[in-house]
Image: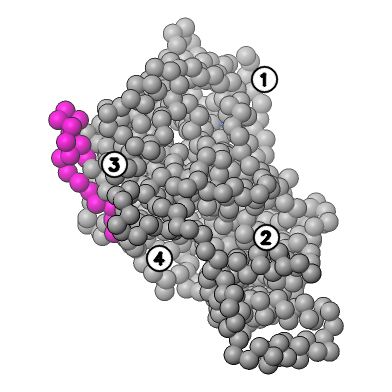
Amino acid sequence: MSLTTYRETAHTNNYEFTSGAGYVLPEYEFVPPPELNSEARVRHPIVIVGGGITGLTLACSLARLGVKAVLIDEDNTVGVKGASSRGICYTQKSLEIFQRLGIFERIAAKGTQWSVGRTFAGDDEVYNFDLRQQGNFHLSSQPPFINIQQFYIEAFLVDRVQELGAVELRWQNRLTAFEQTADAATLTVETPAGSYRIEADHVIDATGSNSPLRKWLNVPFDSRRGDDRWCIADVRFTTHPPAERHTWIEAPFNENRAVWQHLMADDVWRIDYQMAPNADPAYVSREDVVRERLARQFGPDVGVEIVWVGPYAYRSECVHAMRHGRVFLMGDSAKVVSPFGARGGNTGVADADNLAWKLAAVLRGKADAALLQSYQDERLEAAQQNVCVTNRTARFLRPADGSERLFRQAAISLAKQYPFARSLINTGRMAVAQPLQPVQRVHLRNRQRGRPVGAERAFPMGRRHPRPGQRPAELGPGRSAGAGVRRPRARRAAAPAPTLPGRAGAQRAGARHRRRARPGPGTRARPQGPPAGGLPCVRPRLGAGAPRRLPRRHRRNHQRPAGHGHRAFPWPARRQNPMRQDLHFQDADAFYEQLLDAHAGLSREDAELLNARLILLLANQIGDAKVLKACIEAAKRTPS
Ligand SMILES: Cc1cc2nc3c(=O)[nH]c(=O)nc-3n(C[C@H](O)[C@H](O)[C@H](O)COP(=O)(O)OP(=O)(O)OC[C@H]3O[C@@H](n4cnc5c(N)ncnc54)[C@H](O)[C@@H]3O)c2cc1C
């Protein structure tokens, strides 16, 4: 293949087009790989496909552990060519991981720290928070958030991988075909100097939201594409708003639609404008239109330099499984979420962090290959939760006309007055790591003798990492003990068989010691993985039909009282209707009259709004989701 047939990379991640002077991104040299001129089929233990934030975090984590790997990326730069403005907010958990990888100081020096957020509706501030006052953000020495353009982090990771060695970065190497058997995975790679084939034991799909591997492997996934479109504008001002996260649910300067405002590195502000459903993205993103909107927001005299603009349509997707034979999906190739709450890139970082130490342990023979299955169990749950959380935000920000809009109106008006209602204002639930539950213990095993040689207790609730100076026990180079994680006997018995095809898989299925992985950062420890096919809360939000009933073992809220046998797993209790059915009013007639009087003389519209407010106020008085659910069901089922 000649140099000229190599195709340039296209926009990815749903930007329709972009404009502005843009950012100057570093460019990395194409180096012809040795396989191009060799007849011999080379086999690599790990091939990472995709050098975005996820693939590079994995590459850096492996390099730090001294594990050899190859990363291929079709581009010659960081960020996505032509769509370089994407992630901006990096959460404390990711910053902890970056600290371990040795790039936190670079990020802190370049980026902007923030902890205060303010939410406005019209001209009123309805809600504010300071993350530094919240317990969940007191867990490590890193700040709650740093804002920095995603491509800076990626560039720091590239530099760090090169400093550490062990992982080879191959730019302008595009994966064009893939097959896997019980023996190996084979990748066909196209480069400007021709194509070549390599084999791999483990393949990491970090190719982002348009993953070709996902298509070739026919990976089932749930998907929902909304009609909510935003115009992303990165700008510099002559004025200096406070370095806080400001969000408007209804911004007067954006025709009462939502606006986000964040400071990033280099004094660049990210301003996201929600567009009208029928807006023309080309018009809304035109430079003069952007300037006019900025003048409405910051005053006519504000000096503005437009760095970059692009319209963006959000969608959400989640695969049903994150492992397919030798292929591990991570980052956006596994799930795509709207950016509300800064969850996309941050979970990609946590995915990579989760798999890296497991691959290292397995490749060194310190853990059984079955350990790798725990990546899928733990990270799929995280992916599903992120889809669930961001879809709820998307629904709040773009409510369907009718009752959804009415309830949002009721929530906003109540929030201006009552603290409880502020928690209903959903402009993005910022990514927070889940503290470990104290159910899990990690045992380092001596493989020769098959007995534990040391035990690492999961960090207690509320602490995910050791205090400064304390070394987190992890499976890295230099640890001599064989590694495995023991889980309670009852759960081990229910362990799913490993999914690798062929002899290796069969051997593993019969492995003597089944192990449970210690949870990766950002992962909540659970006794078992989520049900195949997705968490019930995710599927309907993705438009995937009615929620399925959880398998029994996941209905963990009912524990059989002690003395009913010795089974360790949750036991479903007899279902009881938690709704009161007896008379509870002190004076039924007076209550009824009160309601009638409250509605007297109101138009239908005002009565509906009053009712929505009333429901929210009363729901808060009830404070129990089960009771509310039973009441909703009773109201729906009552014949007219
Ligand atoms: C407007 C916006 C704001 C956002 N804000 C945030 C935020 O504040 N915080 C946050 O955490 N996340 C945020 N996100 C989400 C975040 O940008 C993504 O989740 C993140 O980029 C996913 O990273 P990734 O590495 O998985 O995929 P990508 O970044 O898409 O990387 C995929 C890589 O794979 C390469 N590739 C693709 N196909 C091939 C192939 N065939 N062969 C070789 N290489 C290939 C590409 O060149 C690319 O480098 C935001 C997204 C948007 C659009």
* Apparent side of residue 453 relative to residue 101 in the rendered image (left or right): left
Q: Which disc, if any, is residue 5? A: 1
Residue where numbered disc 3 is placed: 489
Picture coordinates of residue 400 (x, y %)? 75, 61
How far across and how far down the image is residue 509, in percent?
36, 26
Residue at screen point 49% across, 17% down: 181
Q: In this rendering, which labeled residue sits more in front, label 1 or label 4?
A: 4
- Where residue 166 sits, quadrant-wise, is top left
User: Element at badge 3?
Assistant: helix
Q: Is residue 190 visible?
A: no
State which tag comes first along the sequence, 1 or 3: 1
Identified at 29% across, 41% down, the residue is 489
Residue wearing tag 4? 136
Q: CA distance from mark 4 to mark 3?
A: 32 Å
Mark closest to the chain's N terminus, 2 or 4: 4
Which residue range is magenta in the image? Answer: 444-460
Mark-to-mark CA distance, 2 and 4 = 25 Å
Q: Residues within 10 Å of mark 1 (few under 14, many from 20)?
A: few
The answer for how far apart the CA atoms under marks 1 and 4 are is 52 Å
